[in-house]
Structures are given as structure tokens and as C-alpha cells.
Image (cartoon, rainbow, N blue to C red):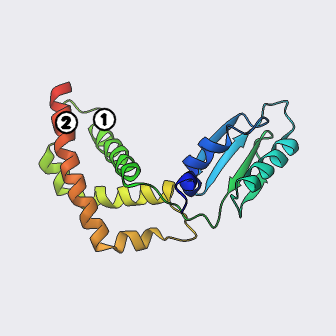
Amino acid sequence: MNSNDVWKHNVEGIIENIKKESKLTILFKKFDGITFECRTPIDGDINAAIHEMEEILNKNDLVPFQIETNKEVSNAYIVQFPELDVIYSNEEKINMYKMIFKFLLDNINQNRKEPVSKGFILDSKDIYIKQTIQAFARSNLNRYKMNVTDLLNDIEYRNHLESFFVRYVDDYMKDKVLTE
């Protein structure tokens, strides 16, 4: 893989690079690991925007792709890469896992006078790991190439994620104590 083409291996990189070239599409929103939505101005020409997007994707060798209009939103269309080999750097994955961990822990601590104890969190770590894997897979993988069940059943992956979670909980609890 050419280091200049690294951006072509995940939706965030693709969006970041192609939106610079797009004149007719004004909004890009990631849906999942292989799909994003594009919007034109309300009074824009969606067919011209789709044509422009096809040219941009072809020029950048981002094929194969599928584009379809959004049936419910007249100025929106969806771009999907069914063959995309989704690749993130380790740093990107770590940041994604931390965001998911934080979301889950903030969610359980919401509307509580006292934060949930570290022991309670660790007693439930299997649930957190399962939810983390499901959230990560839903947002960041190619569902046509990788199955969430395979990740859930990968013991080595789960163990690695579990030890990372335990370390994260320590940092999370320290931050909670400092901010309370």
C-alpha cells in the first residue's frame, strides 16, 4: 500500500480528501464503516452532484462504489464502498475504543450523585467489552467482509480489549474523582 493512499482505506479518510474536490456537495456524514451520506444545497442539482462525485471517486481510484439517492431527503445521496478493506492505524483504533469506553461509562454514571464504583464496572466488564465490540463493528468495519460474531468470538482480541478497558477504567475513575 502506497503511504500516500492510506486515506483510501476508511470512510473518514475518504471524506476528508474528496470533500476538498467537491463543489456541488456541501455536507458529508459518515454512516458506517463503508457508507457516507452527501447533501447538496436545497436548491442544488443532485444529479449534477452525483455525477461530480462519480468523477471524483473514479479519478481517485475509489472503486467499486455505489451511489443512490436518499428516498426521504430530496437533496441527499448515499455513497457506499462494498469492497472496501477498512484499515485504521493502531492510534486511530485506540482513540475509537476510548471514545466508546467513555460513552458507555458516562452513560452508566449519568444522573447519579456518586460515580459507579470501579469494582462494579469491572464486575460487568464482559458486558462493556461486548458492547464496545458491537459499537466498533457497527461504525467502523465492512459488514460484508467481517462479521461482528467473529470479533465477539475472537478470544485473543477480547482479552487484549479487556486489558485495555481495565487500564482505561483506572484513568476514567481518576478523572471522575478530579472533576467531581
Pick whichever, 114 or 27, lies toward us.
Answer: 27
Q: Residue at x 20, y 29 (%)?
A: 113
- Amino acid type of the residue that numbered disc 1 sits on in the rendered structure: Gln
Query: Where does the image place residue 13, in percent across and percent down from the top left?
Result: 56, 48
Q: Position of residue 14 (x, y in %)?
A: 61, 49
> At 59% from the left edge and 55% from the top edge, which residue is drawn?
8
Q: Which residue is mark 2?
A: 115
- Quarter of the image where one finds residue 28: top right
Residue appearing at x 74%, y 39% in the figure? 22
**Which corner quadrant holds the N terminus?**
bottom right
The 10 Å Cα crowd at callout 2, few under 14, some 14 to 19, many 20 or more, is some
Is 54 placed left or right of 11 in the picture?
right
- Using the image, determine if residue 25 lies above or below residue 87: above
Q: Position of residue 53 (x, y in %)?
A: 77, 47
Amino acid under disc 2: Pro
**Residue under numbered circle 1:** 110
Residue 56 location, x and y as percent?
Answer: 75, 48
